[in-house]
Amino acid sequence: MQKTTIHLLRMSETPIELEPRLSVQPSSQPESGRGLQPPPLFQLPLPTQDPSDTHQQMQLQLEPQLSESNPEHQQQAKPVWINRRRLIRLILGFSLCSAILGLVYYMHYNHQNSNIQAGKGRPPEKHNTITHTVTPCLSPACQWASARLSISADPFTQPCDYFLFTCGSDILSPDNGGRQRGQGIPGHPQNQKEKAVWTERRGQSKEREDRGLRKEKIPDRKTVLLQYLREILESNTRPGSTAVQKAKGFYHSCLDTKSIQTAGAEPFLALIQKLGGWAVSGQWNRTDFNSTLRLLMRDYATFPFFNLYVGKDPNEIAHGTTRRYIQIDQPDLLIPIEWNSKTLKSQAKTRTLRPFLASCERYLALLGAPPSSSMIHVGTFISLSSELAVAAAPLDFRLSKGQLYQRMTIRELQKQAPAIDWLGCLQAAFHPLPLIEDDHVLLHNLPYIVQMSRIVGKWLNKHEPSSSGPVHTYMVLSLLHKLMPALDSRFSETAKNLSMALGDAEEGADRWKHCVLETERGFDLVLTHLLSKRTAHREIFIVQQAEEIIQNIFTSFKSKLHELKWTDQKSLQFVMKKIQSLIPRLWTTKEISSEAELDLLFSKVTVGTTSFFSNYVQSLSLWQKRRSQLLTEKAEAADILSVTPFLLGDELLFPMGMFIPPLFHPTYPRAMNYGVMGFIIAKDILHLILPDVYSHSEMVHAVGECVWAHYLTVTEKAGRGGEFSLSAAQQQELWVQYSALQIALQAYHQSLKNHPNDTSISGLSHTRLFLTSFSQVNCDSDPYSKCMPLEPSFLITVICAKSDLCPTSLQCPNKTQQHSLETC
């Protein structure tokens, strides 16, 4: 009895706002040193009951603890005590009911107050006072998210050593040679001259690691999507259709690096013999130039002298026409070139030719070329490459000269560039479509195409006794680069060494990422089918949640535009007219192929478990056939790897690939979804319309400078060595991300008015959970990260300046300039 009474008293003394924390912790903690693995994506059960039912269920789970008694005591107690115990139980039960009723009344009273505050334009809660109770989210997704937050640094309990760390500062330092953000910005914390600052911060970072408060960042969007597709391909579900088995077999053969290493260069050498050999080996049957080119285009998606793709004519899009055309562009040249702005020509310089020459020699050696003759073949290859490079031009130059989307018939193109059998090559590439000479194509660098034809014709007409077939060798080496991902590591290491010598070295992607991308190239329809099948019974709920966020963010975005200071009223009207014409919507795949249709489509594909080279060659053929289908498709096919919104006519489309865990989940509290996905959506929209805003409003510059001034003040860098100015790109990115956070927060508060019973995790409610979730966003997660001079989580301090959105503990007591901060 005494034990039960004490338990009741302790429970009643528990602060109300902490109770949800006890109910949402995961059942098991992750092992030390191992990262949290997210639950199976989209396999998480959706809520099947009302949040109030969940709260009642929690209470029912607590009641048995209050009614437990000691079994030994039951056996020894006398009957007279049984009646007394029943009486005491009755009294305790009545007390418990009274406490619950009081708790319900307290929740109702505080909920009314929050709605009143929200109606006055104030945030629905103050974190420096006792918050009202929120219903905890108990879904598996929320339990995983709660566990993730529990091992991450809390920005509101440790603000002084949290917000001032820029991206990568926990793992990179000036001493280890790693890439640093902000280099070149005087006074920036990551400036390599500030050794003392870095030494101090490395110590703080180590201390945080020891306390288990490292920052668990959300991975970038593309990585999240690739992880999801990886899970599909590695799942051990029932065998399924033959097309699904082939896609999974292709993926696993790509992962089998041991077999790839064992095969070496033999698969490619066998393919060369299939193409008639080549002069490098001394065995070449002098195949016809155009017949070899047609074969490379049709079966291997290889275009040595020009590029082919399918797309629309922008001049027709403005008039509502959706027809697609064959587009012919300059190729991705193998030789490294530079653009000379004085001569307006591309050129290859000696400092880049030397490592390129070494890489060519290495490739020939790996393919068994005799050392005595390899230099001759390398020399003619570089000579031909250099001539072709002179005619190439960068995109901005071609755009300024009006060389993009030049329309002509295939017959007219044949007259302009006669060395290429254009009709035959295009028919081979887009088989079985019936192309004729009167069909139109779009050219993107006609001067290059004309010059390329002259160069190829000149080399083909050379009649030297020791002719080595340089044009054919050029095509074979182009095919080598196309098939290099399927060859052993010696080839990829050679390519990597060349990139390092040219200063373009990048970190290599994980093997599984590479294999997912290669699988998608040939089996995109299969992955689209698996994606749709996996989410079919939840898609309606997912779509509803995603579309709500999109619409609310877009509404808040338009409201934000009205708040900007424009150069004149006409500028505002111009931008708003453009924005009002847009229709934001979720981009979903309307037509999904059935398993029977997929099996028929991939019936001629043979996937081996140990021959990735053969599998890869077939995927290239599938890729080229898929490209051919684009010419006849009317609807815009959904790109399974698309993770950013785009404009299509008057529609602003958001791909489904954006809305996957951990960025989004339909069972998350809305605060989490708005804090992460809402911010990302707002940022994407702002980037799409940035040119219009930047040219008509001075607010972009002013807000960017204001946010930067906050950073310099808090980091105590102001006054050290003069002004610390930002580039225009950095000012724009600061404005974009700060405005995106404001837009997402405003949209969430509006959502909270419509859905006041938002759930919570880790005992964090509403705005606090929104900002904490936002703090997990990684600033390296988008293509504009290089323009962001500080970590996005720092924007929380700017949002919280002179506002009641954050707890008072957010202020660092050792920063004397805090009182001078202004609201941006």
Image (cartoon, rainbow, N blue to C red):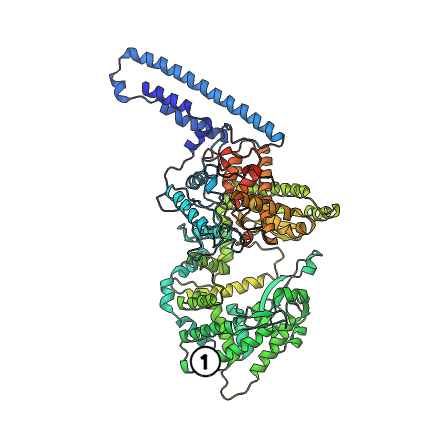
Q: Residues within 10 Å of mark 1 (few under 14, many from 20)?
A: some
Choose between 571 and 233: the one closer to the eye: 571
Q: Position of residue 346 (x, y in %)?
A: 59, 72
Query: 772 left or right of 634?
Result: left
Q: Quadrant of the C terminus?
A: top right
Query: Going by the picture, which residue comes out furthest to the top?
Result: 80
Q: Quadrant of the N terminus?
A: top left
Choose between 349 and 107: the one closer to the eye: 349
Residue at figure coordinates x 39%, y 50% from the top left:
236
Q: Is residue 374 visible?
A: yes
Q: Is residue 102 above or below residue 140?
A: above
Q: Position of residue 787 (x, y in %)?
A: 56, 53
Q: Position of residue 102 (x, y in %)?
A: 48, 20
Q: Which residue is mark 1?
A: 375
In the rendered structure, which amino acid carries the disc numbered 1? Answer: Met
Residue at figure coordinates x 47%, y 66% from the top left:
499
Q: Is residue 617 above or below residue 79?
A: below
